[in-house]
Image (spheres, rainbow, N blue to C red):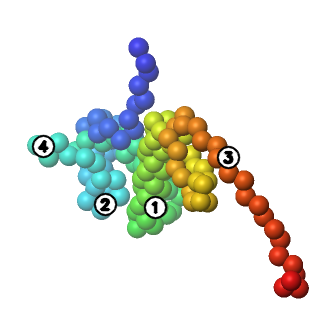
Amino acid sequence: MPEREIDEDAPIFAIAAAAELSNMHPQTLRQYDRLGLVVPARTQGGSRRYSSRHVRQLREVARLSGEGMSLPAIARLLTLEQQVHDLARRVNDLERQLTIERQSRPGARVFAAGATGSVVTLRHGARVRRATDIVLWRPRDMHGD
């Protein structure tokens, strides 16, 4: 059975569990949600659900706040970290798509020169028919002779 990666963004923790994992009071988590610091997902019934990444962010907020960083500065830092995370995920998706595309079309972009000098696209595995024409080239005299 293949191993599956754990989705760090899966909203699996109720507020009580997230508060315990982050060593915070549930009311603190509610306050951080209202301030937009760490915003959990919501169930259909409106209950907060935190992911493992949210718990890591909560721990980081506590650490930075304990070091004297203001909550607006922490919010900005978390926003930038989220943007980096989103961009990294997008790059990974694009790299995966490119790899799939390359594997599904090996050699699809093969070119050759046609008899008139035009560029001709060849199918994968196709061979170029060799021309038997002879072209005579004469250099021009530099003096116009």
Task: Measure the alpha-carbon separation of dots 2 and 3.
Answer: 74 Å
In the image, residue 86 lies at what x, y percent? Answer: 42, 53
Q: Earlier in the sequence, mark 2 or mark 1?
A: 2
Q: Earlier in the sequence, mark 1 or mark 3?
A: 1
Which residue in the protein does label 3 denote?
132
Residue 44 — which label? Answer: 4
Q: Earlier in the sequence, mark 4 or mark 1?
A: 4
Front in this rendered view, residue 38 or 115: 115
Please report the residue visible at 78 percent of the width from the left and 64 percent of the height from the top: 137
Circle nearer the viewer, 2 or 1: 1
Please report the residue visible at 43 percent of the width from the left and 58 percent of the height from the top: 83
Front in this rendered view, residue 75 or 5: 5
Q: Earlier in the sequence, mark 2 or mark 3?
A: 2
Question: Could you tell whether 47 is left or right of 68 in the image?
Answer: left
Would you say residue 24 is visible in this rendering? yes
Question: Could you tell whether 122 is left or right of 130 in the image?
Answer: left
In the picture, the quarter occupied by the C terminus is bottom right
Which residue in the protein does label 1 denote?
80
Element marked by disc 3: loop
Task: Measure the alpha-carbon separation of dots 3 and 4.
Answer: 74 Å
Element marked by disc 4: loop
In the image, residue 103 lies at what x, y percent? Answer: 50, 35
Which residue in the protein does label 2 denote?
36
